[in-house]
Image (spheres, rainbow, N blue to C red):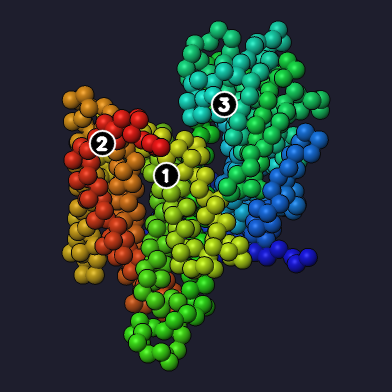
Amino acid sequence: MSQPINRYKADLRDFEFLLFEQFNIDELLKDPKYADWGKEQIEMVINEAYRFVKEYLGPLNATGDKEGCKIVDGRVQVPTGFKAAWKALYENGWKGIAESPDHGGQGAPRLLQICVEEMISGSNTAFSMYPGLTLGAAEVIASVGTPEQHEKYSSKMFVGKWGGTMCLTEPHAGSDVGAATTSAKKNADGTYSIRGTKIFISGGDHDMGENIVHLVLARIEGAKAGTKGLSLFIVPRQRLDGSDNDVTVPSIEHKMGINGSATCVINFGDNDACVGELVGTVEHQGMAQMFLMMNGARIGVGLQGLSCAASAYLNAADYAKDRKQGPSIKNFKDANAPKVNIIEHPDVRRMLIEMKAKVEGTRALGAKLTNHMEWAARLAGKDDAKAGYHHGQVELLTPLYKSYGSDIGFEVSALAIQSMGGAGFLKDHPVEQYCRDAKIFAIYEGTNHIQALDLVGRKLAQNGGANVRAFLGDVQAFVAANKEHPALGPSVALLGKAAEAVGGTVMKFVQWNSSGKFEQTPLVANRFLNMMAETVIGWLLLDQARIALGKSEGASGNDKAFYEGKRYAAQFFAQNVLPNVVGAARIIAAEDSSALQIPDEALGTV
């Protein structure tokens, strides 16, 4: 039997560009808490993380997809090699790069962590789900649980001794979390008896950690209906004394992708013997507490989509440079003309530059979002106005990153298949798996439509609209400063028009709300989210091109090619994508309501 091989690829130079040239991590490193971190340490981590994922995780991606998970004696068995990878991941400290040393972490900037996380996820998305959810659950307990709960539970989760999950969805409720019926009955000793069924629980069971801690949303007997009546409970698979806690896994889902990730149905309390404890000390705070994890998870899902897209693009580019087929378009009438590498064919080049622009632009969006998080935390209590600005941008950009990142995960992977032709559809190459794995991300952690509703229904109005005004002001300031740029001026002008279209559409929403046209807004919310995402990505790509053009003259070799790539990717996106923002604004302003008016009977007629 042949040994599994790594097919994961990452662009380490782009990571370094983001950190040191576009987002100037050196400014963050002046904070005393980062005293142990400098350029040398950061570059070493990036290189070592890449070596680790290529050695441990990448080779298990295709084999884990093929083998999948299975239930044996009531417990989930993960694919061959996952246990060893889990052990190595934690022994090498890769999940704790940015965690506080108090939690066993290394205290690095989160800008570095997202680079490491992209490599972990991109090399093996299914595997990355387990430690990703464990970290999120551990952070919730450490943040809003009691010190005793941290000692009992999250301290073991941070180091991978125990796993963790979040349990929201129920069979009858789907995305309507407030309809949850899982119940909690208070016991005399202060614990709660938990009873109910949760579905679609990623990493809901596995055999890599000694125990699994579930964060379960449930309604205490007598609590009000809806989300305000929900509380959050710590429910371990096994009790602290090692005994069974009446948590069972009757089945796992058989999915289109991420087959190495166990997506479980979990029953709590079938025998009335499931015991949990309230997170913290206050009841009915479940949704607020769970959102601490969900907001981080939404950023993580955007990164998952990006990570699949990034490796799919690089694999497609390598294939295009090596695969010979057909003559050059310049010699298409010459039957004896030599075959050329398909990277010379114009349509393949178009697909490759589109993939490049969307991947690198979305990666920059993730870095921008994380940079705002860093500065919001650093300035809190020192300059509350600036901290508020950064926090507001985090709120505004999170649904954009989650949605656009998850969308391009699938779209770019599909484009990579297309650029490779029939070979891309074969399991001989990794891009077909990236495409299958990535489709779920648009559904995870609140579907992309839920993200769009959150954007137009809540985020645009936050802080009296100041957050979106600050965002548009930042874009317009960039346009004003660069509209006369000798190479980028025409592209910057297109960015200005896109920003105007976004601002105009925001005002359209205000008009609809004041005139009672409430149904019109959710009808176009997804379109608007994409408009806004494409605007910010166009801005970030043009900013990259501005930086690159300033450095390319003195560069040579690979560095010169890298900088030139930044220029052309930005110009392509500006010329080919940003005009769609203006067109989308016109479509929205036209107020078409055909989807609302068509009779139910006219849909799906047979």
Foreground tag (2 vs 1): 2
- Look at the numbered discs 3 and 1 and tell me whether their residues touch, using CB distance below 8 Å: no
Residue 143, image x and y in percent?
56, 30
- Amino acid type, mark 2: Ser
- Reading the image, the residue beneath label 2 is 594
Q: Please, is residue 474 above or below residue 226 in the view? A: below
- Amino acid type, mark 3: Glu
Q: Residue furthest bottom?
A: 336
Residue sitting at 19 percent across and 59 percent down?
Answer: 493
Task: Name the residue nearer the viewer: 55 or 527.
Answer: 527
Q: Please, is residue 82 above or below residue 352 in the view? A: above
Residue 57, image x and y in percent?
66, 56
- Amino acid type, mark 1: Ser
Work out which quarter of the rendered image holds the C terminus and state it: top left
Foreground tag (3 vs 1): 3
Comes first in the chain, label 3 or label 1: 3
Secondary structure state at the residue bearing disc 3? loop
Residue 432, image x and y in percent?
55, 59
Disc 3/disc 1 C-alpha distance (Å): 23 Å
Left or right relative to 561: residue 44: right
**Count of numbered tags:** 3
Left or right relative to 557: residue 393: left
Task: Name the residue nearer the viewer: 99 or 335.
Answer: 335
- Look at the numbered discs 2 and 1 and tell me whether their residues touch, using CB distance below 8 Å: no
Q: Please, is residue 338 above or below residue 184 in the view? A: below
Instruction: Give the number of the disc on residue 403.
Output: 1
Residue 155 seen in the current view: no
